[in-house]
Image: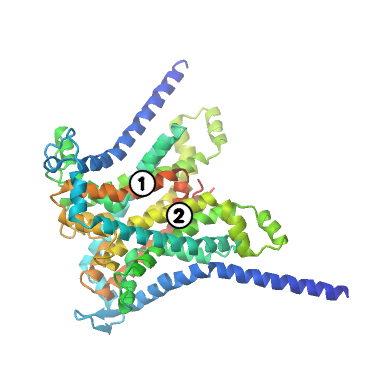
């Protein structure tokens, strides 16, 4: 019986050990990507791979000099902010109405969009957008990416609105507040953190989305993620430049996600799990 | 008079309610119209497209169920279905096992610091395309770090993504690296919501930790695990990004999932009709899986 606390401590230490191991497995590839982006070009493909080297920013310089990286980044930003904006402007009132009326089919319809393979929509969009000459336009890209952001906004905000006690709304109604006024003046300020999570998740998923821009963008409107496909094709020997691109593309979503990490997982399960 | 007064009040109420109903409809109208325009109508259009054949010159002709008949006799479709299911089952199994295991470890650690949480969310918050680029370099058959580590501890090296045999397990591993932490955090949420009283009861009854896990924790966690399964199934059955950035379905056709096959049929060979039939079939499979798991979740709920 006296050995119990000892084995408890051992178990605890083993647990810390396995978590540390998991942490290393999670972080090592990312660290390798970042390290490779700072390696001189002759060292990045050295075999055996080197861990100690004199870091250089030459890969980043090369990336900016040889590719229109900056304009791709601007394209990504336009498409991401535009689609996240549509997602929020359409999604906030819709989530509120669904929460109020408990008529859930509009929310379920957008969820179906979240579950279907993107190619299912891309085929008819391609035909439709081609007919009206919108292939390669920001409009087509923003609209297509809003299909990703809208369900995220609605499903992140639904539980937040549901959590507001009904009596708050009823009191406002007695005072003669209209439903629309209740939403903007009373409900929205109460779900501020939910809106922040929705906005950031919409941004991250729109930024990360690959498939639509692959077909709907052209040379002038190509997003970073779609351009990454070309970087891989061209950069097969220039690993340093490729890893510099990868690092820069991954940076915005990672920084934003860290800001809301506490509420993020509950938001990502589309209402299935409460954090 | 009293009756009249009540009637007036009633009328006022119903017009107020109508007003409210109108306002609520107006609030959801933009989202509903957007969804009809960008999702519902295009899907109906896809059904129509799937009855069409497109010649190389872009001429369209009605072929009724011709594309679906072609699908059944197309070896590449059955191969794609097999690849899709193999990749799905392998990835799902790895992610559920590792995810539950990691969740239990995190739960034991009790306090979860912001740094640990950030660490766990970073794989699945980074673009899958970036994850693909990153692993492409690490898993390079001749110069990659992975083979260096394997050979330096005396294990045989692998061709990873360049090997027709290993490409599917390799992609499953990359996806597991990205999403097992996500499963872990969902399951951790489930663990934290379990009532502590059940553990106390088990402890009083003298149940061993293993028995507690097997008889109490895991059964109570089942609804959460099924939820994680649904969320991962949706993504895994339409697997695209990591494959397209690393192998584009290769080597040969070894990683040609249905989504990759449909995409290439549509946008590389411009066989829009056939691609539509393919994607509708895949969508039916995804929704079928979601409905089945949803029913299972109902069955294991407590």
User: Between marks 1 and 2, how big is the CA–CA gap?
Assistant: 14 Å
Residue bearing the label numbered 2: A199
Residue at point 36%, 50% (across, down):
A253
Residue at point 12%, 36% (across, down):
A48
Q: Secondary structure at mark 2?
A: helix
Compared to residue B300, the image places residue A36 above or below, namely: above
Residue bearing the label numbered 1: A254
Q: Residue furthest right?
A: B1
* Circles 1, 2 touching at the beta carbon (< 8 Å): no
Q: Quadrant of residue A228?
A: bottom left
Count residues near mark 1 (Cα–Cα under 10 Å), then give few for <14, some for 14-19, many for 20+: many
Compared to residue A103, the image places residue B255 above or below, namely: above
Compared to residue B222, the image places residue A84 above or below, namely: below
Compared to residue B70, the image places residue B153 above or below, namely: above
Residue B68 appears left or right of B302: left
Residue A47 location (% of width, % of height): 11, 38
The answer to whether residue B86 of the structure is visible from this angle is no
Residue A3 location (% of width, % of height): 44, 17
């Amino acid at each position: 019986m006296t050995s119990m606390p000892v084995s408890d401590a051992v178990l605890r230490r083993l647990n810390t050990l396995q978590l540390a191991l998991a942490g290393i497995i999670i972080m090592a590839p990312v660290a390798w990507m970042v390290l490779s982006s700072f390696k001189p070009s002759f060292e990045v493909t050295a075999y055996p791979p080197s861990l100690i080297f004199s870091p250089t920013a030459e890969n980043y310089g090369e990336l900016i000099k040889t590719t229109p990286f900056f304009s791709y980044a601007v394209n990504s930003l336009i498409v991401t902010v535009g689609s996240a904006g549509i997602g929020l402007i359409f999604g906030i009132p819709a989530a509120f109405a669904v929460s109020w009326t408990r008529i859930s089919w509009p929310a379920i319809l957008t969820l179906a969009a979240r579950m279907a393979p993107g190619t299912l929509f891309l085929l008819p969009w391609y035909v439709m957008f081609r007919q009206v000459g919108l292939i390669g336009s920001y409009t087509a890209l923003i609209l297509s990416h809003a299909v990703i952001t809208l369900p995220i906004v609605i499903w992140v905000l639904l539980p937040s609105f549901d959590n507001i006690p009904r009596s708050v709304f009823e009191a406002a109604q007695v005072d003669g507040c209209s439903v629309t006024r209740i939403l903007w003046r009373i409900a929205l300020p109460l779900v501020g953190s939910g809106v922040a999570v929705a906005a950031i998740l919409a941004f991250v998923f729109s930024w990360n989305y690959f498939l639509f821009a692959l077909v709907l963008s052209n040379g002038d409107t190509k997003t970073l993620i779609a351009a990454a496909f070309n970087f891989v094709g061209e950069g097969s020997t220039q690993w340093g430049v490729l890893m510099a691109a990868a690092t820069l593309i991954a940076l915005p979503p990672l920084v934003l996600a860290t800001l809301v990490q506490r509420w993020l997982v509950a938001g990502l399960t589309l209402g299935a799990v409460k954090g | 008079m009293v009756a009249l007064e009540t009637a007036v009040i009633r009328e006022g109420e119903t017009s107020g309610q109508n007003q409210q109903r109108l306002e609520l409809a107006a609030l959801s109208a933009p989202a509903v119209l957007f969804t009809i325009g960008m999702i519902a109508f295009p899907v109906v259009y896809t059904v129509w497209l799937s009855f069409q054949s497109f010649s190389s010159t872009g001429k369209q002709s009605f072929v009724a169920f011709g594309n679906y008949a072609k699908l059944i006799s197309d070896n590449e479709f059955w191969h794609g279905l097999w690849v899709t299911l193999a990749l799905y089952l392998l990835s799902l199994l790895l992610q559920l096992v590792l995810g539950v295991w990691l969740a239990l470890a995190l739960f034991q650690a009790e306090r979860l610091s912001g740094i640990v949480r950030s660490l766990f969310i970073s794989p699945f918050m980074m673009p899958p395309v970036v994850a693909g680029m990153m692993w492409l370099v690490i898993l390079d058959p001749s110069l990659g770090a992975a083979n260096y580590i394997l050979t330096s501890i005396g294990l045989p090296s692998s061709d990873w993504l360049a090997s027709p045999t290993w490409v599917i397990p390799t992609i499953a591993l990359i996806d597991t690296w990205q999403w097992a932490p996500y499963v872990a955090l969902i399951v951790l949420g489930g663990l934290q919501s379990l009532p502590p009283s059940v553990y106390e009861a088990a402890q009083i009854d003298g149940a061993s930790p293993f028995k507690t896990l097997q008889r109490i924790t895991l059964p109570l966690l089942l609804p959460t695990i099924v939820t994680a399964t649904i969320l991962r199934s949706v993504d895994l059955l339409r697997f695209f990004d990591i494959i397209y950035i690393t192998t584009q379905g290769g080597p040969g056709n070894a990683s040609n999932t249905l989504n990759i096959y449909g995409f290439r049929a549509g946008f590389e060979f411009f066989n829009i009709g056939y691609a539509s039939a393919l994607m509708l079939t895949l969508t039916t499979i995804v929704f079928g899986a979601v409905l089945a798991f949803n029913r299972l979740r109902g069955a294991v709920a407590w």
